Amino acid sequence: MMEENALDYMHSFLEDQVKNRDLAVDATLGTGRDSLYLKDSLKIQRIYGFDIQKEALDQAKERLGDREGIQLIQDSHENMGHYIHEEVDVVCFNLGYLPGGDKAVITKKESTCRAIEEALKLLREGGLMTILLYRSHKGAQEEVEAVLNLLSQLDQKKFLVHWLSFPNQKNQPAYFLGLKKRTKK
């Protein structure tokens, strides 16, 4: 698996492992591209999409059209546990800012770490989490450090974490993090 960028790695990671999954969370909905991928390419039955910006929800609604099984929620990803009360198969984070939106409205380390912790509680055994960490916007480095610190402290007997970077690419390319919750033996 030698992909060109972090988004391609996210897709390959999920395609290799997602089979007959029922429930996914798009923790950073944005324009709805990840939800569309989860629904159409991976055939996920139900998706919860979170974003704090009405503009993002409007764009996502337009992109997703009338596809069934997608619930869009205008709230912070850190509050996903208020809406989801069952185990989740896949959680995707695409951190940073809304493409084409106000670059001053960004994901922040505190709420992102709380959201990841919440997602870890909801993730079923064998479940997957992907995180794309964009690094070029203001505040990104603090979020990157906080997320990497959080994931590096996870019990290796419970979670397998992959971290991929592209050190020879220009403009601070995104990091890809792929996590799998191990099954108990």
Image (cartoon, rainbow, N blue to C red):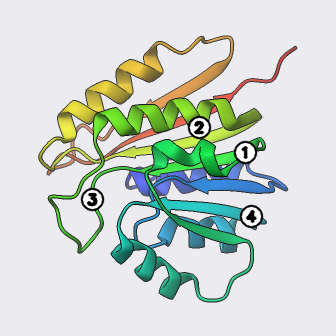
* Residue name at image x 59 percent, y 37 percent: 119
**Residue 154 in view, yes or no:** yes
* Residue name at image x 22 percent, y 44 percent: 135
* Residue that carries the numbered disc 1 in the rendered image: 88
* Residue that carries the numbered disc 3 in the rendered image: 97
Q: Residues within 10 Å of mark 4 (few under 14, many from 20)?
A: some
Image location (x, y in percent) of residue 35: 57, 67
* Residue name at image x 56 percent, y 34 percent: 118
Q: How many angstroms separate mark 4 from mark 3 (CA)?
A: 25 Å
Quadrant for the C terminus in the image: top right
| C-beta proximity under 8 Å, tags 1 and 4 | no
Instruction: Work out whether mark 4 precedes mark 2 in sequence or the reverse, and give the earlier one.
Output: 4
Q: How many angstroms separate mark 2 from mark 3 (CA)?
A: 20 Å
* Residue that carries the numbered disc 4 in the rendered image: 46
Comparing 99 with 80, the one in front is 80
Instruction: Work out whether mark 1 precedes mark 4 in sequence or the reverse, and give the earlier one.
Output: 4
Task: State the image quarter where residue 168 is shown.
Answer: top left
* Residue name at image x 14 percent, y 51 percent: 171
| C-beta proximity under 8 Å, tags 2 and 1 | yes
Image location (x, y in percent) of residue 177: 46, 37
Residue furthest to the front in view is: 82
Q: Residues within 10 Å of mark 1 (few under 14, many from 20)?
A: many
Instruction: Work out whether mark 2 precedes mark 3 in sequence or the reverse, and give the earlier one.
Output: 3
89 lies above or below 41: above
At label 2, which amino acid type do we have? Ala
At label 4, which amino acid type do we have? Arg
* Residue that carries the numbered disc 2 in the rendered image: 119
| Left or right: 126, with 41 as reference point | right
At label 1, which amino acid type do we have? Val
Comparing 3 with 184, the one in front is 184
158 lies above or below 114: above
